[in-house]
Each structure stands twice: as structure tokens, then as C-alpha cells.
């Protein structure tokens, strides 16, 4: 297996895990209370979601790069 494909697969797993953590934290009771009062997610939740999105984009770059 090509090294770039392996890095891409590892990054996809990491991205899925980060998005899972972000969504889990956003749907927690404390996360929903925080969102109700402030109107936005906490910094930690946004960090997980954005980190997962960025890791996903980088993963697809490594997977489909020629």
C-alpha cells in the first residue's frame, strides 16, 4: 500500500473520531445548556468539529493525490 494512502486512511479515522467527539459533546446536556445561553457551541466543541473537518479534507487530499 502506498504511504500516502495509508496516511489518508489514518486521517479519515482520526477525522471521524474528532467529529464523533464534537457531536457527542454538542448533544450533551451541558453542551445544550451552553448553546441555549450563548447561542453557539463551546470552543472545545468547535475545535473537535473543525479539527475533524480539516483532517477529513487533508485525508481526501492524500487519498486522491496522484
Image (cartoon, rainbow, N blue to C red):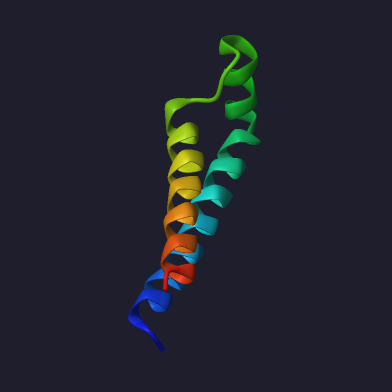
Total marks shown come to 0
Task: Give the residue displayed 50% in from the left and 46% down from the top.
Answer: 53
Give the quarter of the image for residue 58.
bottom left
Q: Quadrant of the N terminus?
A: bottom left
Asked if residue 13 is positioned above or below residue 37 in the image, the reply reads: below
Asked if residue 2 is positioned above or below residue 62 in the image, the reply reads: below
Asked if residue 21 is positioned above or below residue 50 in the image, the reply reads: below
User: Which residue is more in the foreground, 1 or 65?
Assistant: 65
In the image: residue 38, left or right of residue 55: right
- Given the current orientation, which residue lies at the most extreme bottom position? 1
In the image: residue 25, left or right of residue 14: right
Asked if residue 36 is positioned above or below residue 15 in the image, the reply reads: above
Q: Position of residue 21 (x, y in %)?
A: 53, 48
- Given the current orientation, which residue lies at the most extreme top position? 37
User: Which residue is more in the foreground, 44 or 49?
Assistant: 49
Give the quarter of the image for residue 51.
top left
- Given the current orientation, which residue lies at the most extreme left position? 3
Q: Position of residue 7 (x, y in %)?
A: 37, 71
In the image: residue 49, left or right of residue 51: right
User: Which residue is more in the foreground, 53 or 24?
Assistant: 53
In the image: residue 30, left or right of residue 3: right
Task: Give the residue displayed 38% in from the left and 84% down from the top.
Answer: 2
Task: Give the residue displayed 42% in from the left and 73% down from the top.
Answer: 66
Task: Give the residue displayed 47% in from the left and 39% down from the top.
Answer: 50
Q: Position of residue 22 (x, y in %)?
A: 54, 42
- Given the current orientation, which residue lies at the most extreme front position? 66
Q: Position of residue 36 (x, y in %)?
A: 65, 15
Amino acid at each position: 500500500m502506498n504511504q500516502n494512502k495509508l496516511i489518508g486512511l489514518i486521517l479519515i479515522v482520526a477525522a471521524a473520531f474528532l467529529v464523533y467527539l464534537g457531536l457527542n459533546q454538542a448533544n450533551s446536556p451541558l453542551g445544550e445548556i451552553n448553546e441555549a445561553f450563548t447561542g453557539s457551541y463551546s470552543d472545545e466543541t468547535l475545535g473537535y468539529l473543525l479539527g475533524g473537518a480539516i483532517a477529513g479534507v487533508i485525508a481526501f487530499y492524500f487519498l486522491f493525490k496522484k
